[in-house]
């Protein structure tokens, strides 16, 4: 399964409302309780699959203005660059899980890209705009921290045993066990560093999330079903 949603599909989602009107960040009795979902994940815990399955389960439900549920993952970088009229070449300087702090600092000093905090602010602006639009599932990039004060955003953390994650990464990327372990260690270390450096937050702190799901015990499709059921049961109509 291809875990990424193409940029064109995401742009179709954004362009369905060219000039969005300001919306309250708090749920009302008339509107949906939850308008967006963030997913923080360990590498190999199935974040992409859970997000896609969740989007399918929510289609036609919780739909302000009839907008489809859309997943934003690595394509979020392209959306940030488009929103802020930045050159596409900057995309390679913006991964949350692959650039070391030393290389990031050196590249800034050499003028290869804007200061990291400028890119972070621009990323945060795009994430907040998407969450305000509603019907989005945003993976990674500290989205759960950025939208932490928005009462209509549901935050999920996905984890799984190391052996389960190694097996998944091996199968998905056709890697040896050693290469899969190195990928997991590198990416998880990068995500942890990103949260600590820019938000002074511990990505493993369960208190940042509404739910933490172990996809080693609960397969991806069942995890998505659990999240969807939780979101739908908390709607005003469901509580009456």
Image: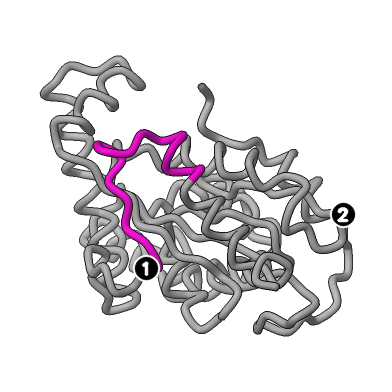
Mark 2 crowd level (few <14, some 14–19, many ≥20, 10 Å Cα): few
Above or below, comparing residue 167 to residue 208 in the picture: above
Q: Which residue is identified by label 2?
A: 16
Q: Nearer the viewer, residue 147 or 183?
A: 147
* SS type, badge 2: loop
**Residue located at (73% from left, 82% from top):** 28
Residue 30 found in image quarter: bottom right
**Residue located at (60% from left, 47% from top):** 71
Q: CA distance from mark 1 to mark 2?
A: 30 Å
**Residue located at (23% from left, 49% from top):** 188
Above or below, comparing residue 150 to residue 137 in the picture: below
Considering every residue shown, the one lying at the far left of the view is 178
Classify residue 61 as left or right of residue 198: right
* SS type, badge 1: loop
Which numbered tag is attached to residue 209? Answer: 1
Mark 1 crowd level (few <14, some 14–19, many ≥20, 10 Å Cα): some
Q: Earlier in the sequence, mark 1 or mark 2?
A: 2
């Amino acid at each position: 399964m291809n875990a990424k949603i193409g940029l064109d599909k995401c742009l179709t989602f954004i362009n369905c409302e060219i000039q969005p009107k300001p919306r309250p960040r708090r749920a009302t009795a008339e509107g949906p309780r939850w308008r967006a979902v963030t997913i923080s994940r360990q590498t190999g815990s199935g974040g992409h699959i859970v997000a896609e399955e969740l989007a399918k389960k929510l289609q036609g439900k919780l739909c302000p203005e009839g907008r489809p549920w859309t997943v934003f993952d690595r394509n979020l970088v392209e959306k940030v660059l488009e929103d802020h009229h930045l050159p596409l070449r900057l995309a390679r300087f913006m991964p949350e899980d692959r650039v070391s702090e030393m290389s990031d600092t050196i590249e800034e000093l050499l003028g290869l890209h804007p200061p990291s905090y400028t890119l972070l602010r621009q990323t945060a602006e795009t994430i907040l705009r998407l969450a305000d639009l509603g019907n989005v599932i945003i993976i990674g990039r500290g989205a759960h921290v950025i939208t932490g004060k928005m009462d209509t955003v549901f935050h999920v953390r996905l984890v799984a045993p190391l052996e389960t994650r190694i097996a998944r990464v091996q199968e998905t990327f056709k890697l040896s066990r050693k290469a899969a372990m190195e990928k997991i260690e590198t990416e998880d270390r990068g995500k942890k560093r990103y949260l600590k450096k820019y938000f002074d937050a511990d990505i493993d702190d369960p208190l940042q999330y509404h739910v933490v799901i172990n996809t080693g015990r609960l397969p991806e499709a069942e995890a998505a079903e659990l999240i969807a059921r939780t979101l739908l049961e908390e709607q005003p109509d469901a509580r009456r």
